Image (spheres, rainbow, N blue to C red):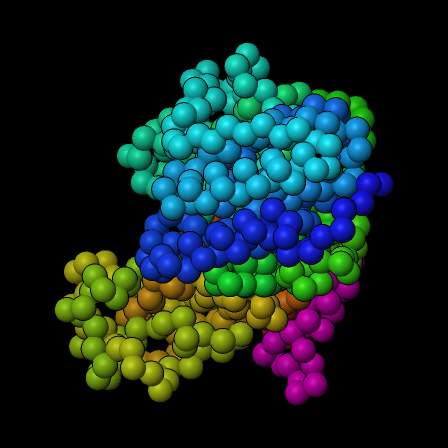
Amino acid sequence: MASYKRHSWESLPSRFADRLGAGIVARKTPAERKAGGLYLTPVEVADFIAGQANTSASEIRILDPAAGSGTLLCAIVEGLAIAEPRVRKVELTAYETDPDLQEALASVLDRLKRWAEEHQVEVSVRIEKQDFVLAHAGSFRSNGHLFDTQSRECFDLVIANPPYFKISKDDPRAQAAMVVVHGQPNIYALFMAATAALLRKGGEFLFITPRSFASGPYFRLFREKFFANIRPVGVHVFGSRREAFGRDEVLQESIILRGVRDDGWQHSREGFELEITGSAGIADLAHLNRRSLPLRDALDMASSSKIFRLPILPGEDAALRLVDSWTGSLHQYEMNISTGPVVPFRATEYIDKIGVPSNDYAPLIWMNHVLAMQVTFPIETRKPQYISTVATEKSLLLPNRNYVLIRRFSAKEEARRLVAAPWLKGSVPGSLLGIENHLNYIYSMRDEMNENEALGLAALLNSELLDTYFRVSSGNTQVSATELRAMPLPPRDMIVFIGQRVRKQSGGESLDDIVKEAIGTAR
């Protein structure tokens, strides 16, 4: 392995790029950073990504479609110069639309060229000052095939930390990508698709992105098209939302996806493996949790949902297998799940801080009323907790019946992602109930869910078993009704049994103990 010549670590081009980029971003307002999805790659993460590259040709073409100040490109070239002595020529193509970053990028890559020359590596640079997705809109084929094998550009390695923000369905970029995404897509998925389309067969794909593309209905079509040609080889999961991009306060759960272009790989009889690593954030990247598993166990391309599951710990596999073995569902049990209909800023004329549940007012349940297995109403809060029964005219109120309430949002660092509680109609007097939009609620499509069903479902959702299943299957910060609707459930008798046991719960018995007992009895 080659070694660096004697010089200060801080003089490396990647460190210069990191300092320059951080200074530019610091001068922008939070609104400007958010609008541009501007979260530059920390240099430690760039080094880690660079270490994943597995190319050793003497000449390499590299594309970064969202180059920023060039930290990631520099880290890649530095890594190749050290670890791959056969590399002698590197062609870099970098796209950047921010004028401030364009100037910095040119300066950084000039410095990189001089540094590489000292290490006997010739670097050529092309900077494109245009929108990458629009420039390559032709990559999204109207016939439904994502990849244009006749592309005039063909790269050996594509790397990126793309911007993260939603675009409207009328945005020209969303219109161009309708064969891959629908609705209001997040821009990063369009970068993934268009960039991968420019990758040669056998070429490498290295992206750091939110994990949200791995599950959920909005990305199902994207997963179908993208994974038809990109075979995942490895994934790194950051356990903390904040620690991967600490200085920019990113709350998205981030992953690094490593793949190769392997058209039609899912039809191969070969047994492909997937390496999954994990760290809390940047500080412990040198001490990873690491495991390998059959790729088919993480990504079943024959399934309708094509969810990309990422079990980091071996014990999580058992939870997946058990829950997947269940054949029940909300629909099968004549139940459904919806999102609370009360959007407070649209219902200001109906909601009030003062009221008594009666014919005139109904309780308005917010997310902070709901804890695991417990709804407390009223509570000390500045939020209005009552809603006029006149709101029935706008279909904002529900009959005061038995429900299961589930928080739609939770911090990943919390002990459990799923937080659910039974709402029993006798909890508060009155015939009507308001449920705020940050809650989902499960209800019976029959006359009414019985209390044991409500208690049993809530206990299941709060259990370690289903929480593990959800965490492994979903990286979304939002607990969506669609994902819960699709979640397998055990036999109805088991749900009722759990509800009955919750009623008799002793002080030293946990919900997990009750769920384990019910599962053990069923076996």
Q: Farthest residue toward the right?
A: 1
Please give the name of the residue rendered at 51% of the width and 33% of the height, measured from the top-left corner. Answer: 94
Relative to the observer, which residue lies in front, 101 or 303? 101
Give yes or no for residue 516 being in the magenta stretch: yes
In the rendered structure, the answer to whether residue 430 lies left or right of residue 62 reads left
Residue 332 appears anywhere in the view? no
For this rendering, which residue is in front, 456 or 6? Answer: 6
Quadrant occupied by the N terminus: top right
In the image, residue 370 sits, relative to residue 251, either above or below, namely below
Q: Which residues are magenta?
A: 502-523
Q: Residue at x 73, y 48 (%)?
A: 276
Return the residue found at the far top. Answer: 150
What is the total number of numbered labels drawn onto the structure image?
0
Residue under the point 63% across and 81% down: 504
What secondary structure is the magenta-colored segment mainly?
A: helix
Camera sees residue 223: yes
- Image coordinates for residue 274, horizontal then vertical, percent: 75, 40
Give the residue at x 48% y 52%: 21
